[in-house]
Image (cartoon, grey):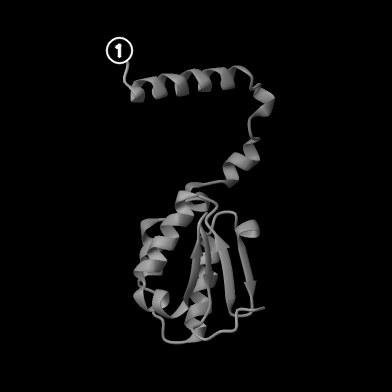
Amino acid sequence: MKTLKGQNEERDRVLCELLWEHISDDDTPNEKVQNKMSDKDIYPTDEELRTIKNWSMKSIKDYHNLMNYIYQLWYNNDYAWHQIDNIYKISTMDWCGNQDIIYAMKQNKIFWLFFWYQSTRGGHYMFCPVGEDIEK
């Protein structure tokens, strides 16, 4: 008798086989797109995460510089990143690289204490300086 885990693994294997049967060579990403998407473009390195964790937070300028740095690392930043003045609304889009960036931001205690405003279900975060009018 198969365990539930074994049944799920078998189901996933069969579904993947069926999916690949229906994908033609024309459906694969073109070489230019594949070459453009290096690991650096997709996932933050340990060094980049350490940089976020250790970012010096002494002024509002440091806050914006850190957020600009994170923006460069953020996967799908065109859709999941919105800024209005000092307010940043970002979404992880359930992507593990973005979630690791959020974890590094949380480890920067001064940043999280003074600039984190809100987290909501679904990986949505809002950041702004303490006392900022968020009704914008």
- When asked about the image quadrant of residue 100, the answer is bottom left
Q: Residues within 10 Å of mark 1 (few under 14, many from 20)?
A: few
Residue 50 percent location from the top left of the image: 35, 65
Position of residue 63 relative to residue 74, above or below, is: below
What residue is rendered at 44% in x and 60% in y?
A: 101
- When asked about the image quadrant of residue 111, the answer is bottom left
Can you identify the residue that label 1 sits on? 1
What amino acid does circle 1 point to?
Answer: Met
Q: Residue furthest top?
A: 1
Q: Is residue 78 visible?
A: yes
Q: Give the camera-side residue of 52 and 120.
A: 120
Residue 109 lies left or right of residue 19; in this view the side is: left
Q: Give the camera-side residue of 96 and 8.
A: 8
Q: Residue furthest right?
A: 26
Position of residue 72 relative to residue 115, above or below, is: above
Residue 6 lies left or right of residue 44; in this view the side is: left
What residue is rendered at 64% in x and 34% in y?
A: 29
Q: Give the camera-side residue of 99 and 50.
A: 99
What residue is rendered at 39% in x and 61% in y?
A: 103
- Quadrant location of the N terminus in the rendered image: top left
- Quadrant location of the C terminus in the rendered image: bottom right
Asked which secondary structure carries label 1, the reply is: loop
Residue 12 percent location from the top left of the image: 46, 24
- When asked about the image quadrant of residue 99, the answer is bottom left
Q: How many marks?
A: 1
Position of residue 34 relative to residue 21, above or below, is: below
Q: Is residue 51 visible?
A: no
